[in-house]
């Protein structure tokens, strides 16, 4: 992170801090470097400072400390309208007193682009989001999904290199949201624009982005590609926040050859991947993904530690089975199995033994 | 589908036609709703619609020269019946001959008996000043008037042969007349009934209407210019601060109108706070203190202050719900802050501007107390003259005609607003 001024950096946050009231820091020491053309998502719980970061980038909030650079130039003193950043707002912010056509034409008019050029660009942008025939309507006469597309088209029509989107799909139903996720990523990649996308929906973040920055408490907890984020969470917040996760608490007994032996609070021993622990005696929170748990004795590795478990509930979910277990005093231990022809359906009350590969079981901070 | 086509007359479960059942059910609900609003409806009818209707009637109807009402008993006696008969027989413009004066002499006797010469004379005096005394004098001497009548009347007063007087009497002998409306716009009738302007030195009403219109527009504009930023501040400040500001805006509502007006007098008069301060600082010599009170400046300043909340509140109510992200969006799309304001924010507040302007304008067109107190001679508005005719000259018909013209003007304005902006866009708060 120290060498943040790499040559291909397009957007850079350099030690940025932000406080609204002078008492608490909403954003604490933010460092972030984005290359041109990247689709980066800021993901985090409500109030973690995502919108604040976006607003600082767009120029509606000033950074209390630190530097924000765009294309190598500091933009701290450039007013919003000169930054040339397209923005899609959470509530779309389509101008209610203008038609769709006028809405799209607005950014071109304020740039003094000639009428014929303007018409062509508006037409192209509307067709890009498949809204070509709606030009004469007002925003109130469109459905939520249509408004969303128009907002997207408006943010793109003046061909900005950087587009910010603040939870643009928050108001849409699940089906439409999935469709729009697909369309937005496609558009972004085909136009080659750089996108900073804010959401608190982790599925959205994982499916759309090149990289995801997980925010909590004003700090980027982890910045990685979706698969790394899911499979190799670097701390227990990320592990908890991304996807479903089982946690067990205990203390490190010893670390050998890159495998940590952890003694759980009820005395049982398990083998883990020491991610955030360095020495024996540390408290740790162990995290295992529900789909990486094995209870078929034949497939368990030789010689590893296993845990006893009692089946509490079996839920049939169509494509998968979801089984709730009691493991080491934890009643919320979930196992997910694929609905395959040979898959065993566990019965409540059954006593089984479970295990996993040591590298799937990550010993994180307590 | 097939159900409805096979069975066109839908019925309820117990076999009654559905439409009739629905109508009955709805009628009951309507009756109940009507009963609930009935008291208010009656109140409005009695206290609002009826007086306006009566005023409008009074502006075209005055029976001062046709009917005498005994004050104590309320007994009504027709007066001036003989001269009325003569007017009916002879067309307008006929030289009044001996017969006319004979009829007049007969009527004078009635006036004397009824002691109604004063009120009948007043009616004529409205349109031709200086004639009231002629009637009282003639009635006093009614018993001594003997043929030849014409000479007898001329002996009493030479003006009895004045054709203009006879034109006024002819018009007044029927209670319905448009003459008060003519008077309200500085017109009168010549002896042969043509409409002409009154003498220049007696033209007051048109000038006053013009002044009222001009000052109202000015006040409306001033309240807008002062109120728009305040409303914007109110709508964008955090609630904690905006509440305090709102109290300051509403404060004028909580103090008596008189107190507010008098405090302006204290500030603006030539020995007042502002002049004293200017003289004290040395910006002004003691000899040439600014005259800010008892003229148009006083009226404009005080009324702008008093009517300001009526502009701020509708503006505030349209500005409050405007999401700040609109302006932000405009800025991010490349608009300067001025363009974002003018093209995005301002158009969304037009409904509030219309409502506030309409409210302030209508209120100031009819404003009375403040101009009466601080307006002096040059700051009087039309409503002050209406009040004068109601309280001092007691010419209620003229007052009613002036008021009706004012009402008509406001209604036209309202109609125009509806045509241009649409009354359903009006947001009053
Ligand atoms: N204008 C403001 N004045 C004061 N505090 C603010 C302001 N805007 C945001 N905050 C505070 O800053 C913190 C971060 O807010 P922010 O809007 O960035 O969160 P977010 O991550 O976008 O959350 P969400 O997912 O709910 O949109 C919150 O605690 C919020 O209360
Ligand atoms: Mg937010």
Image: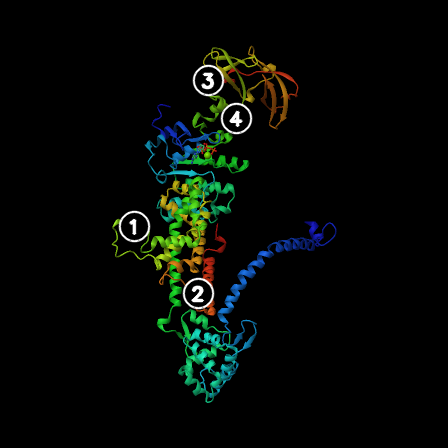
Task: Give coordinates of residue A47: x percent, y percent.
Answer: 46, 31
The answer to whether marks 1 and 2 mark residues whose Cβ atoms lie closer than 8 Å is: no
The answer to whether marks 3 and 2 mark residues whose Cβ atoms lie closer than 8 Å is: no
**Which one is in front, B275 or B297?**
B275
* Discs 3 and 4 carry the same chain letter: yes
**Which one is in front, B274 or B41?**
B274
| Disc 3: residue Cβ within 8 A of ligand 1's nearest atom | no
**Which one is in front, B50 or B81?**
B81
| Disc 2: residue Cβ within 8 A of ligand 1's nearest atom | no
**Which label is found at residue B386?**
2
**Which one is in front, A230 or B185?**
B185
Q: Which residue is mark 3?
A: A276
First in sequence: mark 1 vs mark 2: 1
| Disc 4: residue Cβ within 8 A of ligand 1's nearest atom | no
**Which label is found at residue A243?**
4
Image quarter where ligand 1 lies: top left
Q: CA distance from mark 3 to mark 1?
A: 75 Å
Label 4 crowd bin: few (<14), some (14–19), many (20+), radius 10 Å: some
- Residue A310 in sight here: yes
Above or below: residue B414 compared with residue A94: below
* Discs 1 and 4 carry the same chain letter: no
* Discs 3 and 2 carry the same chain letter: no
Q: CA distance from mark 4 to mark 2?
A: 80 Å
Task: Give coordinates of residue B123: x percent, y percent.
Answer: 47, 74
Q: Which residue is mark 1?
A: B277
- Which element type, helix, strand or loop, lies under badge 2? helix
Figure quadrant of residue B97: bottom left
């Amino acid at each position: 992170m120290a060498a943040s001024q790499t040559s291909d950096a397009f957007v850079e946050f350099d030690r940025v801090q932000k406080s609204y009231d002078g008492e608490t820091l909403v954003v604490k020491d933010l460092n972030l470097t984005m290359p041109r053309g990247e689709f980066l998502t800021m993901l985090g719980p409500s109030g973690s400072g995502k919108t604040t970061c976006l607003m600082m980038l767009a120029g509606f909030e000033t950074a209390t400390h630190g530097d924000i650079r765009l294309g190598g130039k500091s933009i701290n003193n450039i007013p919003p309208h000169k930054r040339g950043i397209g923005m899609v707002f959470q509530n779309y912010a389509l101008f209610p007193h203008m038609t769709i056509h006028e809405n799209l034409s607005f950014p071109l008019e304020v740039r003094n682009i000639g009428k014929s050029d303007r018409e062509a660009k508006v037409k192209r942008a509307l067709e890009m989001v498949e809204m070509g025939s709606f030009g004469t309507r007002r925003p109130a006469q469109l459905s939520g999904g249509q408004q969303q597309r128009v907002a997207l088209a408006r943010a793109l029509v003046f061909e900005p290199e950087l587009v910010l989107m603040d939870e643009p799909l928050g108001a849409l139903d699940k089906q439409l949201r999935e469709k729009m996720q697909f369309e937005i990523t496609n558009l972004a990649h085909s136009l080659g624009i750089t996108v900073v996308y804010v959401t608190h929906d982790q599925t959205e973040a994982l499916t759309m982005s090149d990289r995801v920055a997980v925010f909590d408490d004003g700090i980027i907890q982890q910045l990685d590609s979706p698969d790394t984020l899911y499979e190799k969470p670097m701390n227990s917040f990320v592990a908890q926040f991304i996807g479903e996760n089982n946690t067990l608490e205990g203390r490190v007994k010893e670390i050998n050859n890159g495998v940590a032996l952890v003694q759980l609070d009820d005395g049982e021993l398990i083998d883990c991947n020491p991610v955030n622990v360095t020495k024996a005696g540390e408290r740790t929170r162990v995290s295992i993904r529900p789909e990486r748990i094995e209870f078929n004795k034949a497939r368990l590795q030789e010689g590893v530690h296993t845990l006893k478990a009692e089946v509490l509930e079996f839920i049939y979910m169509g494509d998968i089975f979801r089984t709730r277990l009691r493991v080491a005093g934890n009643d919320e231990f979930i196992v997910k199995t694929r609905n395959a022809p040979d898959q065993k359906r566990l019965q409540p009350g059954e006593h089984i033994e479970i295990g996993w590969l040591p590298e799937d079981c990550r010993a994180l901070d307590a | 589908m097939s159900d409805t086509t096979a069975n066109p007359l839908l019925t309820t479960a117990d076999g009654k036609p559905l439409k009739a059942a629905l109508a009955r059910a709805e009628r009951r609900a309507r009756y109940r709703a009507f009963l609930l609003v009935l008291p208010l409806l009656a109140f409005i009818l009695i206290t609002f619609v009826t007086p306006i209707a009566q005023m409008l009637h009074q502006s075209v109807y005055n029976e001062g020269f046709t009917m005498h009402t005994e004050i104590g008993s309320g007994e009504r006696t027709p007066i001036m019946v003989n001269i009325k008969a003569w007017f009916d027989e002879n067309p307008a413009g006929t030289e009044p001959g001996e017969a006319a004066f004979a009829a007049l002499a007969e009527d004078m006797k009635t006036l004397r008996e009824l002691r109604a010469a004063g009120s009948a004379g007043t009616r004529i005096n409205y349109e031709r000043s200086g004639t009231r005394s002629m009637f009282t004098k003639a009635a006093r001497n009614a018993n001594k008037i003997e043929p030849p009548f014409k000479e007898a009347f001329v002996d009493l007063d030479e003006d009895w042969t004045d054709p203009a007087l006879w034109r006024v009497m002819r018009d007044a002998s029927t209670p319905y007349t448009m003459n008060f409306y003519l008077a309200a716009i500085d017109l009168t009738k010549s002896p042969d009934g043509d409409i002409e302007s009154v003498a220049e030195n007696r033209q007051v009403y048109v000038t006053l209407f013009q002044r009222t219109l001009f000052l109202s527009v000015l006040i409306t504009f001033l309240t807008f210019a002062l109120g728009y930023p305040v409303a914007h501040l109110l709508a964008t400040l955090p609630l904690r601060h905006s509440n305090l500001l709102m109290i300051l805006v509403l404060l004028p509502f909580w103090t008596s109108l008189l107190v507010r007006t008098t405090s302006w007098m204290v500030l603006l008069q030539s020995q007042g706070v502002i002049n004293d301060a200017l003289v004290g600082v040395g910006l002004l010599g003691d000899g040439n203190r600014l005259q800010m009170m008892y003229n148009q400046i006083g009226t404009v300043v005080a009324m702008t202050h008093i009517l300001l909340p009526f502009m701020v509140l509708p503006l505030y109510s349209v500005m409050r719900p405007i999401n700040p992200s609109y302006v932000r969006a405009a800025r991010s799309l490349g608009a300067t802050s001025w363009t974002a304001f003018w093209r995005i924010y301002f158009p969304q507040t037009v409904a509030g501007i219309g409502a506030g302007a309409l409210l302030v304008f209508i209120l100031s067109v009819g404003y009375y107390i403040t101009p009466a107190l601080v307006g002096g001679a040059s700051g009087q508005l039309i409503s002050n003259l209406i009040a004068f005719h109601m309280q001092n000259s007691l010419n209620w018909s003229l007052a009613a005609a002036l008021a009706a013209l004012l009402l008509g003007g406001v209604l036209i304005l309202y109609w125009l607003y509806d045509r241009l902006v649409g009354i359903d866009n009006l947001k009053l708060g």
